Amino acid sequence: MGMQRGIAWCWVLVCAVALGSAAVWGLPAVKRGDADPVGAWVGLAGLMVAGWSGWMSWRALRHQERDAVAMAGLLARAVLQAESRARAQLLGQDSTTIDVRFVARPATTRNAAGAAAEGRLSEVAGYYQRLRPGRLVITGAPGAGKTVLAVELILALLENRRPDDPVPVRLSLTSWAALPAPPRGVGRVAANRDPGVAAHAVRAWVCRHLVETYAGISPTTAAALMDAGLILPVLDGLDEMAAEDTPGYGSPARQALSVLNAFQQGRLKASMVLTCRSEQYEALEAVQVWAQDAARIEISQVSPAQVRQFVQERVENVARWECLLDALDRAPSSALVRVLCTPWRLTMAVTTYEQRDAATGDYLREPQDLLRPALGSDEAVRDHLLGLFLQDATTRRLAPRGGTYAPGQVRAWLGALAAHLSGNTLTGRTVAGRPLSGTDLVPHELWPLIGTRRPRMVEAALVAVTLSGVCTLGMWVSDWGFASAPVFVALILPVFIALLRANGHHWIQASPGPPLIGPRQLRAPRARHRTAVLLAFVPLVGLGYLLLVQVQPDKALGISFCLLFGFLVWLVARPGGSVDALDLMDSPRTAVRSELVAALLFGLPVGVLYGAMVRPVFGVLAGVAIGLLCGLGGTGTRYIALLVCTRRGRHALPWRLRRFLHWATEAGLLRVAGTAYQFRHRELQDWLAAAPPTTPDDTPRPHSTGRRPRSSTAG
């Protein structure tokens, strides 16, 4: 807390020194009745910005002073809202669930105490709370409902949470790559067994997730929540960490389990909930690796009686479904019954066959169509249901602004994204040493979809064109003319490169990250020296240029205000904390937009400086360009490069990619998982990836060669 107060007082001191210096220099030159109105206006604007900066700083400090228990309460409310939406998406916007049963599958040794022999979804919270320690592994067949069971557990724990109880937070284990490497001198095997190293790795991963997902949580607050034991990690998708169906000892899943086994809080293993397919988990047990001191449960297959009960509770006209319900008794071993005994496919069947015409109210299809001889295999029924599900989702949900997406467009665009994810999983592809995710869709991190070279070349071209345009415009509107090109390059290029480098951005770096300077990053020790250098560098360079071009003192007063306080506003007013509530950051859709706003807050005051040298219109345009290129830190320009390179071909994507992904989420084809989009179900992703590629006009294209993604799914 002392460090944050020190930074705030340092800002106040810098502002006071700047104000005093400007007053001593500028006020003696201003005669009574001879004040320049432009300089007065700019100075007033600077004072307003300064007031806003102080207000935002006070809000940030007040937010940081909340104790961990109070912050845990705010986090619990945000998680409850987010997981409630996730539950609705998983259940097809309906509240009816299948009360699936599960049975205990204890390991040969090192099991948690208090595990009952069996249980059911409606009682999962009580089952978990009896475990000592609180470590639970949820396993099951593909599509058995593992994620739904985990979400039900989260919601049940939150609904009955006491103030000092931990907050369950769901994380996707495919973000294993975000875990830091072992400390220098510590081997990976030793790191997996060292409780201190393991605790540091898991703590850093969870803290990063909290900071990136929930607006209002700073790194300091996230660390305090973890250290106080107020976070219960719910780790979803251990089986999705690699492509193999039988992960071996060297697999990422085994490495994750080894670290989690060494993760302790005090003298006991740290509490956690883990989901994994039964086949993958049993393969890990075969190499003598499992979640130690945990209770493993396995979800049982849905019985025909449960199928009948679910249909009767979910549909509006049970008589339409009698032919299908009779098949449950006549042919219990048929392909149709096997498919319907999977919760995901049963939900998909009911959803698609309950669709009605919006104008007449007539049902679009009858359940008896599922009894056709052509649907005599599991794969045929699966493909039929997935095709109807995609078609219904496309026609049921209007595109933004009342438009529509063609089913061929949706299938082609989602197919390109699914093929990219499946390719990452099958090949273990990495960029700059960072493994690419096989499940997460983050818009500004999708550029490797078209290779690693083309987007970087396009990004470099965008930077060069923008910078050249600013220089050309400046020479055109100035009195110096085009003969002053070396002067403009000397004025703009050094500051531009210095700001760009200080913000951690390299034009053609392999994997651009978020800006390194901002209110959250200020609390990280490794970023403070960059901030200090930039705080000192910008006013000094600005003052030097003012003296070089001999700007009048009264104008220099206003320009100094805008330059200094505008930069401080950029540091403080970026998307961040809320005092009274934590909001789930819709970062998959708004990450680039948020960075754009922050960039403009930073770039416009810098542009005012150059506008004072030549003309105001040039200053505004220069500020926008500098903000776009410097403040975005590479993510925005790389995202634009992705859109430029995906105009046609099998990798074609829509221009408004973020808007399309948001629409697909509302249509039930995708879901939001923290800071990323994910396909509604892994089976849908694999089905789209394995289908022959199509263009947006639904014209088939030659099927590319390569390995076929696994047909299995994750619950």
Image (spheres, grey):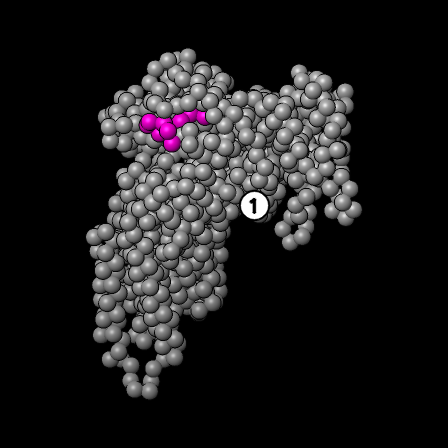
185 and 256: which is toward the camera:
256
Figure quadrant of residue 79 = top left
State the image quarter where residue 201 is shown: top left
**Residue 21 lies in quadrant:** bottom left
Of residue 664 and residue 535, the one placed in the foreground of this image is 664
Q: Position of residue 255 (x, y in %)?
A: 37, 23
The residue identified by callout 1 is: 662
Q: Nearer the viewer, residue 211 or 506?
A: 211
Label 1: which secondary element = helix
Q: Is residue 186 above or below residue 588?
A: above
Residue 134 painted magenta: yes
Amino acid type at image mark 1: His
Residue numbers of the magenta segment: 129-138
Residue 275's spot in the image, x, y percent?
45, 27
Left-right relation of 10 to 376: left
User: Does residue 46 show up?
Assistant: no
Q: How many neighbours does mark 1 have within 10 angstroms: few (below 14), some (14-19), or many (20 or more)?
A: many
State whether residue 628 is above or below residue 314. below
Residue at horizontal 50%, vertical 32%?
122
